[in-house]
Image (cartoon, rainbow, N blue to C red):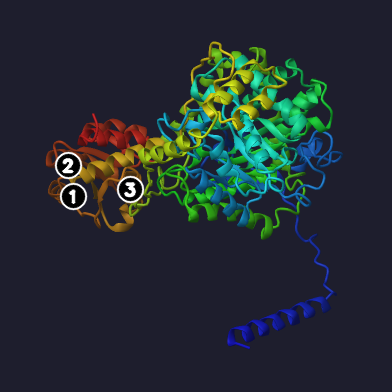
């Protein structure tokens, strides 16, 4: 036995001895708690007020959210008594507490790591690699060209964001060797699922697979695509027919496959709050129920083909509450249409919200993603696609994918997240928030329905305007640093080197993919293919998918399959543009870095630190962090004894701006002397004061020459932007 093995054996024996000793000590003394008097709320509040040292209790202890909900400082049983779930159980009644009675014990949530390699063969290898290493779902992410049903030979950006697919051969390569009878397949098709569904079925049949064993989803979200892109591309009636055709085919041939996907990311990425996100998706799904039922599906068939994808955001408790709130609301909607209890069950897939991810200090995205997974699991999702930490910058690599995948595996296998069923159930805070979210989501949903549904609302621009208002509020709060974006508007890492975006060679991709496509098309019977496409164009809704499978098998491309839809006028609306909360600060910092690289110069800020270090340090440190958000050069020092010394040093620095740093008590004496000297020493420089001046001194400081203030109330973004403009970094 090696020394290492011997040490391990000894450690095991020691552990066994400790456990036996613990088992023997079963006689533990009672520990009474009656010596402690439970404090009243008023006593607790009085102690809080004392600790706040004059800060207003109502302002500091209550947190307002973008949803119009205010978090209380503490929640109590007596105020939650009426809403505690005493008679409702997970998997029963309204499904608020989860869709299954045993939670994740028998069936863990699905780990759906997205695979987005550009070439079909490479993505096939990645799919196998992910499942081998812990994923439980084949999650295929196609590129923008495929979502738009563009031929790769003509696509503007082949491979952007995913795998490039054009022909049946591409689909054969993508699915080759995948165990589709064992693992679900997730494949989002954009505005219509028909081309990808037909190609998948054709390729799987040709390889000897049985389509009835397919599970997961090959789905479309035409309203989501319309809201995102501003156009439906083709007539909505054609998309409704495709949707019904896919749903009917799946009901008959692949009952484990869903074909309608309601995605919330268009709203989330636009900056929507959680109430808007959930209400608009419920309104979208309700529209899909109607169009499917109009085309011959029953309510149970229509509801069971719909799957929801939600973005998990930054507010931890609201993410739990929104999932618990939306399930009973969906059940209520389906029930109102006459749906059975089984049809009322909502199937939820989720992923981290891209809106809250950053380009700078991207490793913090790992922490953001982890909290978002955790809240989603506590809220009761069915599957989760964890994003790579470098998602805002590039496609992931082996390292970032492994980290993303392993977070979920660790939560399942090491953190015990499979064991508790509805872990938030009975929580005074979460139950309260769930009730509040239900009420607000339902009210927002009713408002959309009162406009005639989500489509008329989008035509009128109501969701767009509501989301824009929230987005502007988010941007304003980030500018004022009320919302703290670590590594961006707060705590910037000045030694950080930006990650390599690893741009793909689109010309080379197009060349290689064109060769693959043309090689495949050179060996098909064009006359037979055209006949199959003619049959597809003439097919009824009930026969449409089978005709599409036949056309795909005959060699029709993805573009040709999509072009078989009936003609008509596309729908157009004002698009909801995607954003990220940190984008303004990222652009600002990038502008500084680019200017510095091009001109070997930067905005220089001189700190006029007055007095000994203890006197100025707090304000100097705050100011340094404030200005480094813009990647500016901050010139610090150990302080000056006199205004003349500070002005002389400032002149020698040739700085673009000066910040006076000291204390409120010393400012009335220092500022009137120092500010004029600084303007004389640096006539072109702006002079700031660190801190906020009291009202009775504002005019005095202004007359002395203070141009602006750097404090917790200052608009960080606007101040930094003005310094960039003055430097000539931008027009």
Q: Is residue 465 left or right of residue 590?
A: right
- The answer to which of marks 3 and 1 sits earlier in the sequence is 1
| Labelled disc at residue 663 | 3
Which callout, 3 or 1, points to the residue nearer the camera? 1
Does residue 563 sit above or below 158 in this rendering?
Answer: above
Local SS, label 1: helix
Q: How many marks are shown on the rendered structure?
A: 3
In the foreground, 630 or 199: 199
Task: Residue 461: give x, y in percent of width and height.
Answer: 53, 15
Task: Residue 463: give x, y in percent of width and height.
Answer: 56, 20
In the foreground, 89 or 152: 152
Q: Alpha-carbon neighbours of circle 2 within 10 Å: few (<14), some, or many (≥20)? A: many
- Disc 3 from disc 2: Cα separation: 18 Å
Q: List the residue tagged with mark 1.
A: 646
- Disc 1 from disc 2: Cα separation: 8 Å
Local SS, label 2: helix
Which callout, 3 or 2, points to the residue nearer the camera? 2
Q: For residue 264, which quarter of the picture?
A: top right
Task: Residue 668: give x, y in percent of width and height.
Answer: 28, 41
- The answer to which of marks 3 and 2 sits earlier in the sequence is 3
In the foreground, 187 or 10: 187
Quarter of the picture containing the N terminus is: bottom right
Q: Alpha-carbon neighbours of circle 1 within 10 Å: few (<14), some, or many (≥20)? A: many
Badges 1 and 2: C-beta atoms under 8 Å apart? yes
Q: Alpha-carbon neighbours of circle 3 within 10 Å: few (<14), some, or many (≥20)? A: some
Does residue 61 sit above or below 133 in this rendering?
Answer: above
Q: List the residue tagged with mark 2.
A: 678
Local SS, label 3: loop
- The answer to which of marks 1 and 2 sits earlier in the sequence is 1
Q: Is residue 704 left or right of residue 195?
A: left
């Amino acid at each position: 036995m090696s020394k290492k093995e011997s040490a391990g054996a000894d450690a095991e024996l020691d552990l066994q001895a400790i456990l036996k000793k613990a088992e023997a000590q079963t006689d533990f003394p009672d520990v009474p708690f009656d010596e402690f008097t439970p404090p009243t709320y008023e006593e607790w509040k009085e102690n809080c007020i004392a600790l706040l040292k004059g800060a207003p209790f109502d302002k500091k202890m209550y947190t307002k959210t973008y949803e119009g909900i205010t978090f209380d400082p503490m929640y109590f049983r007596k105020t939650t008594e009426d809403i505690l779930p005493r008679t409702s159980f997970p998997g029963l009644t309204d499904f608020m507490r989860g869709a299954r009675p045993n939670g994740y014990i028998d069936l863990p949530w699905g780990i759906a790591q997205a695979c987005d390699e550009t070439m079909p063969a490479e993505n096939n290898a990645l799919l196998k690699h992910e499942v081998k290493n812990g994923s439980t779902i084949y999650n295929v992410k196609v590129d923008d060209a495929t979502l738009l049903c563009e031929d790769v030979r003509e696509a503007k950006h082949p491979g952007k964001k995913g795998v490039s697919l054009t022909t049946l051969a591409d689909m054969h390569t993508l699915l080759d060797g995948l165990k589709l009878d064992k693992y679900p397949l997730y494949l989002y098709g954009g505005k219509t699922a028909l081309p990808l569904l037909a190609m998948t079925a054709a390729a799987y049949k040709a390889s000897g697979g049985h389509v009835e064993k397919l599970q997961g989803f090959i789905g479309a979200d035409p309203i989501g695509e319309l809201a995102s892109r501003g156009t439906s591309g083709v007539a909505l009636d054609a998309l409704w027919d495709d949707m019904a055709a896919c749903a009917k085919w799946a009901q008959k041939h692949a009952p484990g496959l869903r074909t309608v996907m309601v995605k919330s990311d268009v709203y989330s990425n636009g900056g929507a709050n959680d109430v808007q996100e959930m209400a608009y998706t419920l309104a979208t799904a309700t529209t899909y129920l109607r169009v499917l039922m109009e085309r011959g599906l029953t309510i149970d068939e229509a509801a069971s083909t719909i799957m929801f994808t939600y973005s998990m955001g930054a507010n931890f408790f609201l993410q739990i509450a929104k999932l618990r709130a939306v399930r009973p609301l969906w059940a209520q909607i389906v029930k109102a249409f006459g749906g059975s209890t089984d049809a009322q069950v909502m199937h939820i897939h989720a992923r981290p919200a891209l809106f809250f991810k950053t380009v700078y200090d991207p490793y913090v995205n790992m922490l953001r993603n982890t909290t978002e997974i955790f809240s989603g699991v506590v809220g009761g999702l069915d599957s989760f696609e964890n994003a790579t930490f470098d998602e805002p910058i590039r496609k992931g690599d082996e390292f970032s994918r492994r980290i993303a995948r392993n977070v979920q595996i660790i939560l399942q296998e090491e953190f015990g997240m499979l064991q508790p069923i509805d872990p938030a159930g009975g929580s005074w805070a979460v139950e309260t928030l769930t009730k509040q979210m239900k009420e607000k989501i339902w009210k927002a949903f009713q408002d959309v329905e009162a406009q005639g549904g989500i489509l008329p609302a989008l035509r009128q621009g109501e969701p767009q305007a509501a989301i824009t208002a929230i987005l502007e509020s988010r941007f304003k709060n980030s500018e004022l640093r009320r919302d703290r974006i670590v590594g961006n508007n707060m705590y910037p890492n000045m030694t950080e080197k930006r990650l390599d975006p690893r741009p793909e060679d689109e010309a080379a991709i197009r060349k290689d993919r064109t060769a693959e496509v043309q090689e495949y098309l050179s060996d098909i019977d064009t006359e037979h293919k055209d006949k199959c496409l003619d049959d597809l164009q003439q097919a009824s809704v009930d026969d449409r998918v089978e005709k599409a499978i036949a056309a795909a098998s005959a060699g029709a491309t993805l573009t040709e399959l999509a072009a078989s839809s009936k003609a008509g006028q596309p729908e157009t609306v004002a698009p909801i543009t995607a954003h990220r909360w940190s984008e303004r600060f990222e652009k600002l910092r990038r502008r500084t870095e680019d200017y510095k690289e091009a001109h070997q110069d930067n905005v220089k800020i001189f700190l006029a630190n007055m007095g000994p270090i203890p006197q100025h340090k707090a304000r100097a440190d705050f100011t340094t962090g404030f200005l480094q958000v813009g990647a500016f050069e901050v010139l610090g020092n150990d302080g000056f004894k006199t205004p003349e010394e500070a002005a002389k040093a400032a002149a020698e620095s040739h700085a673009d701006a000066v910040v006076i740093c000291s204390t409120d008590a010393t400012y009335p004496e220092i500022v009137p002397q120092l500010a004029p000297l600084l303007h004389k020493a640096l006539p072109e420089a702006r002079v700031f004061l660190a801190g906020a001046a009291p009202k009775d001194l504002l005019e005095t400081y202004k007359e002395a020459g203070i141009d602006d203030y750097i404090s917790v109330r200052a608009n960080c973004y606007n101040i930094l932007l003005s310094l960039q403009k003055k430097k000539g970094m931008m027009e």
